[in-house]
Image: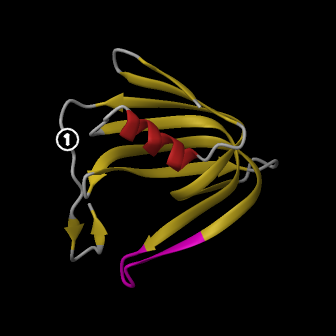
Amino acid sequence: MKYKKTNLGYVVRLYRGEEVVSSLVEIAERENILSGFVVGLGAVSDVRLGYYDLETKEYYSKNFEEEYEIGNMVGNIAQVDGKAFLHAHMTISDKECKAFAGHLFSAKIYATGEFFIYTFDSKMERKLDEEIGLKL
């Protein structure tokens, strides 16, 4: 990975084989990013996307093992129990431009990944919402 601080946050380049979620969390921890907004694009493989079922309070996930373009990735960085946490959703498209989307659990860079972390000057902390069943 390679990244550079800017006046708005960080510009990030992830290389083939690097994992998206853990790499962005690593940068947040290394740079002490307490909160921020993340967007990205590129190409990925070995993607795991999910859907949260409010009735069962469980995530259902699906693996996508081919190569895909990132149509969009959007998310935020906050703190959970004193550690950086990335909550992101991703839309991917296959060779036929068929799209799939959901909560991003993991994705491996296939060609390149270009991400932008816009940092905020205040800390966001996620806490468990009992009714929803998630740390919001």
Mark 1 belongs to which amino acid?
Lys
Residue 46 versus residue 57: which sits nearer the camera? 46
| Residue that protrudes farthest toward the left in the picture | 122
Spot occupied by residue 122 in the image (x, y as percentages of width and height):
18, 35
Residue 33 lies in magenta, yes or no? Answer: no
- In the depicted view, which residue is nearer to us: 4 or 117? 4
Q: Is residue 69 left or right of residue 5?
A: right
Which quarter of the figure is the N terminus placed in? top right
Count of numbered tags: 1
Relative side of 113 to 32, left or right: right
Locate residue 29: give its quadrant. Answer: top left
Question: On the image, which quarter does residue 113 sit in?
Answer: top right
- Within 10 Å of the Cα at label 1, are there few (<14), some (14-19), or many (20+) other Cα atoms? some
* First to last magenta residue range: 53-61
Which residue carries the number 1 mark? 123
Residue at 41% over, 31% down:
117
Residue at 75% x, 60% y is 65
In this view, 112 is above or below 73: above
The residue located at (23%, 68%) in the rendering is 128
105 lies above or below 94: below
Residue, x 31% and y 51% (percent of image)? Answer: 83
Report the quarter where the C terminus lies: bottom left
Q: Residue furthest bottom?
A: 56
* Vertical placement of residue 12 versus 69, above or below: above
Residue 15 versus residue 65 in the image, above or below: above
For this orientation, the residue located farthest to the front is: 30
The answer to if 58 sits in the magenta stretch is yes
Position of residue 93 measured from the top left corner of the image (x, y, whole percent): 70, 49
- When asked about the image quadrant of residue 36, the answer is top left
